[in-house]
C-alpha cells in the first residue's frame, strides 16, 4: 500500500477547533473518555458510514450524563439512518444537536451514566454524503476524517483512540495511499484486510486526548467510486483553507495575510514532501520482522534525516578502519587501503564519494549512495511488515542505550557506547541523551576515535589489554593507556562533532533530500488541467467554529456531554 504525505494541510490559528456543547440547565459535566474506537467505511456510492464506540467514566462530582453530542462530517445526511446504543441497549432519543452543527444529540434516558459510573456509547451514522474529493488528478479520490472530540472544560485524562479506515470494496492493497499521521500516532498505520476483504488502515494512540482534534486521511483510485460522487474542490479548498478561516483572515489580517497564508501553506507542504525519501512501495504490508539490517539500513527504514544517515556511514567506515577524518573544518576524509575490515557495498561507495575534494561532485556521489541504499532496503523489506520491523529496530536502539546507561563502570560504559554508537544515533533525542548519559565521570576514548576526531587521537593498536568486568558478567578488553576525557567534555565533543560532520556532509539538507526524493519517491504527475490535489472542504461554514481547514476533509466537529 502506498503512502503519501497529506497534501497542503494548513490549519489557521484563527480557526477555533473543538468547541464543545454547553451544559443545559446549570448541570455539571465532567468525565473521562477512556476509549474511542471509530470505524469509517468509505463506500462505493461516495458516502461514508461512521461507527463510534466511546467509553465514558463520569466524574464523581458531576451530574448524570444524560446526553452526548456527536459531530457528523457534513450536513448532508439522514437523521433516520442514525442508530445508537448504550452498553448494548438500544436508544431511541436521537435528534439534531442544538450545540454541534452538523451533529446529533443522543439521549441516554434511563441509562444515563451516574456519577462515578462507566458506560460505552455506540453510535452509527450511515450514508453521509459530500465527503469524497478529487485527489491529485481526476483518477484519484482524497478523503480525510476527524473523530469526535470534546471541550477541554468537560473531558480530562488520556483516551485510547483507535481509528479504522475501511476503503471501498475492490481497492487492491497496493493502490491506496495514506496521508501523514497526526502527532502522537505512528507515522504509518497498521494495514490489512477486514472480514469483508476490504483494505483497512488502523491508527492507534493509547495516550490521545479527548479534547484534541486529530485528522486522518487516505487516497485511492476513483474507479472504485460511483461517477458523479466525487466533488471537485474549489481553489480555496485546494489550498487547505476553509471559508471560515478565510473570512476571519480577511477581517483581521486583510488580503496581505491571505496571500501570506497561501504562500506559507505551499512552502510547508513542499518541504514536507521533499523530506519523505522512503518510496511508497516499501509500505506494502507483509508479515513478520525483517531481521539482520544494519544500523544504517534501519535508519533509512525509520526515515532518519539523511545528514544523520551519512554521518552514521562515516562512523561505520571509520570503526572498520576504512576511512579517517584528516581535517574537521572544512571536512576532509581520506580512504584507508586496504581497510581493517571488509566494507559493505554502501560503505565502499560512500568512501569513494566522501574523499572527492570537489563539493558539488561529492554531493552528487553521496546522493547516488543514498538512492542505492534506499532501493536496497526496499528490496530487503519485500514481504515483511514495515511497522513490526520499525518497532523491532527501535527496540534495539533502546536496548543499546540501556546497556550504556546501566554499565557498572566508566570503562564498560565507554566500551558499550563505542560498540553501539550507530544504533544510539537512531534516537531523535541522541544529542540530549548523550549529554545526560555522560554528564559525570571519565570516558575512555575508543581506539578508532582519532579517525573521527583528529584532535583526540588515541594512537595505534592497544598494548597489554586488561580485563574489565561487564555489567552482565564476563569481561571486556580495554587498556589503561587509552586517553580519557571528562564525561561532560566527551558528550559535548560527540554532539558537536556529529552536528558539524552532518553539516559538512550535507550543507543544505532540504535540497539534498529533495534530489534523492525525486528518484526514490517522485511526486505523482500533474493532471492535464495542472491542478494539484486531494483537497476538500470541512463541515460547517462561517458559523461552525470547528470548521476543518484540511485536505479532502470530511471532518466531524466536536461534540460534548450535556
Image (cartoon, helix red, strand yellow):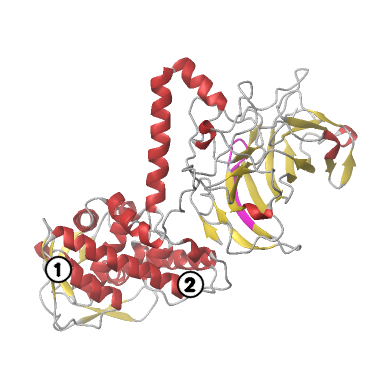
What x and y, as percent, mark residue 42? 70, 49
Q: Upstream in the sequence, badge 2 or badge 1?
A: 1
Q: Quadrant of residue 439?
A: bottom left
The structure residue drawn at horizontal position 65% and vertical position 32%, both measured from the top left corner, is: 539
Residue 555 drawn at (x, y percent): 64, 37
Q: Is residue 133 above or below residue 97?
A: below
Q: Which residue is drawn at the image coordinates 43% and 53% (left, top)?
A: 523
Taking the magenta stretch, the answer to whether it contains residue 203 is yes
Q: Quadrant of residue 490?
A: bottom left
Residue range (magenta):
201-214
Side of 309 relative to 141 (left or right): left
Badge 1 element: loop
Which residue does the numbered mark 2 point to in the structure image?
381
Q: Is residue 295 visible?
A: yes
Disc ID at residue 355: 1
Tell me if residue 42 comes above or below residue 559 in the rendering.
below
The x, y position of residue 49, in whole percent, is 75, 46
Q: Residue at x 58, y 72 (%)?
A: 287
Crowding at label 1, few (<14), some or many (≥20) Cα neighbours within 10 Å? some
Amino acid at each position: 500500500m502506498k503512502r503519501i504525505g497529506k497534501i497542503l494541510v494548513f490549519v489557521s490559528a484563527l480557526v477555533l477547533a473543538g468547541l464543545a456543547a454547553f451544559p443545559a440547565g446549570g448541570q455539571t459535566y465532567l468525565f473521562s473518555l477512556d476509549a474511542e474506537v471509530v470505524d469509517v467505511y468509505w463506500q462505493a456510492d461516495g458516502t461514508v458510514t461512521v461507527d463510534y464506540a466511546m467509553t465514558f467514566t463520569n466524574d464523581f462530582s458531576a451530574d448524570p450524563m444524560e446526553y452526548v453530542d456527536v459531530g457528523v462530517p457534513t450536513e448532508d445526511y439522514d437523521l433516520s439512518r442514525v442508530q445508537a446504543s448504550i452498553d448494548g441497549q438500544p436508544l431511541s432519543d436521537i435528534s439534531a444537536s442544538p450545540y454541534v452543527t452538523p451533529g446529533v444529540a443522543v439521549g441516554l434516558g434511563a441509562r444515563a451514566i451516574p456519577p462515578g459510573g462507566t458506560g460505552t456509547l455506540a453510535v452509527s451514522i450511515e450514508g453521509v454524503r459530500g465527503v469524497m474529493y478529487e485527489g491529485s488528478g481526476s483518477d484519484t479520490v482524497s478523503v480525510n476524517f476527524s473523530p469526535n472530540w470534546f471541550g477541554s472544560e468537560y473531558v480530562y485524562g488520556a483516551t485510547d483512540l483507535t481509528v479504522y479506515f475501511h476503503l471501498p470494496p475492490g481497492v487492491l492493497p497496493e493502490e491506496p495511499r495514506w496521508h501523514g499521521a497526526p502527532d502522537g500516532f505512528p507515522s504509518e498505520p497498521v494495514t490489512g484486510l477486514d472480514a469483508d476483504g476490504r483494505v483497512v488502515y488502523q491508527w492507534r494512540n493509547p495516550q490521545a486526548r479527548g479534547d484534541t482534534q486529530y485528522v486522518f486521511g487516505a487516497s485511492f483510485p476513483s474507479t472504485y467510486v460511483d461517477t458523479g460522487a466525487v466533488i471537485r474542490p474549489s481553489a480555496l479548498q485546494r489550498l487547505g483553507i476553509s471559508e471560515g478561516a478565510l473570512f476571519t483572515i480577511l477581517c483581521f489580517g486583510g488580503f496581505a495575510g491571505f496571500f501570506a497564508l497561501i504562500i506559507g501553506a505551499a512552502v510547508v507542504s513542499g518541504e514536507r514532501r521533499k523530506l519523505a525519501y522512503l518510496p511508497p512501495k516499501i509500505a506494502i504490508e507483509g508479515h513478520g520482522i525483517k531481521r539482520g539490517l544494519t544500523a544504517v539500513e534501519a535508519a533509512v527504514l525509520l526515515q532518519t534525516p539523511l545528514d544523520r544517515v551519512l554521518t552514521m556511514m562515516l562512523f561505520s567506515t571509520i570503526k572498520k578502519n576504512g576511512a579517517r577524518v584528516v581535517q574537521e573544518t572544512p571536512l576532509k576524509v581520506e580512504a584507508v587501503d586496504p581497510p581493517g575490515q571488509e566494507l559493505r557495498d554502501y560503505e565502499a561507495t560512500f568512501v569513494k564519494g566522501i574523499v572527492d575534494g570537489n563539493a558539488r561532485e561529492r554531493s552528487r556521489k553521496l546522493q547516488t549512495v543514498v538512492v542505492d541504499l534506499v532501493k536496497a532496503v526496499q528490496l530487503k523489506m519485500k514481504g515483511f511488515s514495515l511497522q513490526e520491523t520499525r518497532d523491532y529496530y527501535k527496540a534495539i536502539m533502546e536496548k543499546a542505550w540501556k546497556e550504556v546507561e546501566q554499565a557498572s563502570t566508566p570503562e564498560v560504559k565507554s566500551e558499550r557506547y563505542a560498540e553501539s554508537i550507530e544504533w544510539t544515533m537512531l534516537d531523535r533525542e541522541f544529542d540530549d541523551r548523550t549529554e545526560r548519559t555522560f554528564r559525570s565521570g571519565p570516558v575512555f576514548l575508543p581506539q578508532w576515535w582519532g579517525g573521527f576526531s583528529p584532535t583526540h587521537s588515541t594512537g595505534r593498536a592497544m598494548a597489554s589489554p586488561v580485563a574489565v568486568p561487564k555489567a552482565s558478567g564476563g569481561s571486556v578488553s580495554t587498556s589503561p593507556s587509552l586517553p580519557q576525557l571528562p564525561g561532560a567534555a566527551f558528550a559535548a565533543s560527540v554532539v558537536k562533532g556529529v552536528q558539524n560532520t552532518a553539516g559538512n556532509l550535507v550543507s543544505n539538507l532540504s535540497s539534498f533530500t529533495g534530489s534523492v526524493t525525486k528518484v526514490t519517491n517522485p511526486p505523482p504527475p500533474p493532471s492535464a488541467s495542472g491542478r494539484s490535489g486531494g483537497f476538500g472542504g470541512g463541515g460547517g461554514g462561517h458559523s461552525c467554529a470547528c470548521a476543518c481547514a484540511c485536505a479532502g476533509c470530511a471532518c466531524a466537529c466536536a461534540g460534548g456531554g450535556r
